[in-house]
Image (cartoon, rainbow, N blue to C red):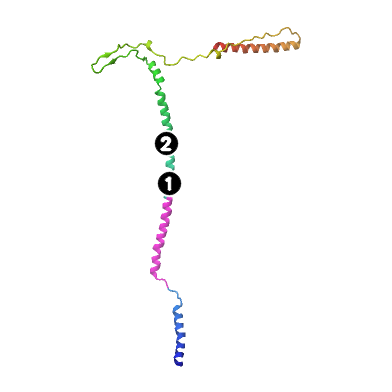
Amino acid sequence: MSALMNQARNRVPRIAEAAVERARLSVVPRAPGRSAARVPFVVLVSLLLVGGVAGLLCFNTSMQQASFTSTAMEERSAALDAREQSLVMELDALRDPQRVAVKAQKMGMVPATSPAFIRLSDGKVLGKPTAATPENALRVTPLPTRKPANLRPTPIVIEVKPDTTAKTSAGDGAASADGTAATGTKKAHDRTRKQGSQR
């Protein structure tokens, strides 16, 4: 029995040493096929990165170009809208009945006073047609308006005569000043009278 125990004791260290020897790590040299397999992966990732950056730049450029085009089209649309409004206003001015009547009158056209009608069923003429003459012309442009009487008052003119009795030097100075004032007042009244006569 003791012999078996001794054998077991001797075997355990040997088994442990063998296990430790097997468990030790060792450097394994690289196989030539693995380094070659890693190159395509690096190339693929690089191509994806370059393609992504190039696509982003192209997308950004196209968005900027679309923005410029949109701004230019909006400006052109605004200019065309303004042009359309001006043309509509011009057309409305050309279609004005007052303007058409004035042009017709300048061309010698006058309105018909007694028109005649043709009955289509039998071709009979109804009414007595007479030729229009320049005396039948109507006034197209309105008469000039006159101001009411209360807006055309008669001017009131007051004449001031200068005082010539003073003989002293001071009095002469005062008299000349009064004469100048009177002359200025007379000119103002004459101006007022002219304006009243023009009205």
Q: Which mark is residue 77?
A: 2
Name the quarter where the N terminus is drawn.
Answer: bottom left
Find the residue positioned furthest to the right. Answer: 168
For label 1, the crowd category at 10 Å Cα-Cα, with few meaning under 14, some 14 to 19 and many 20 or more, is few
Name the quarter where the C terminus is drawn.
Answer: top right
Who's the residue at 44% across and 81% down the image?
19
Q: Viewed as shown, does residue 175 lie left or right of 142? A: right
Q: Which residues are magenta?
A: 29-57
Q: In the depicted view, which residue is nearer to us: 54 or 71? A: 71
Where on the picture, by quarter, is residue 153?
A: top right
Residue 151 to residue 44: above or below: above
Who's the residue at 38% across and 10% down the image?
135
Q: How many marks?
A: 2
Where on the picture, by quarter, is residue 116?
A: top left
Residue 40, magenta (yes or no): yes
- For label 1, the residue is 63
Residue 172, magenta (yes or no): no
Q: In the depicted view, which residue is nearer to us: 101 or 63? A: 101
Q: In the depicted view, which residue is nearer to us: 12 or 49? A: 12
Who's the residue at 46% across and 82% down the image?
16
Find the residue positioned furthest to the top. Answer: 165
Q: Which mark is residue 198?
A: none
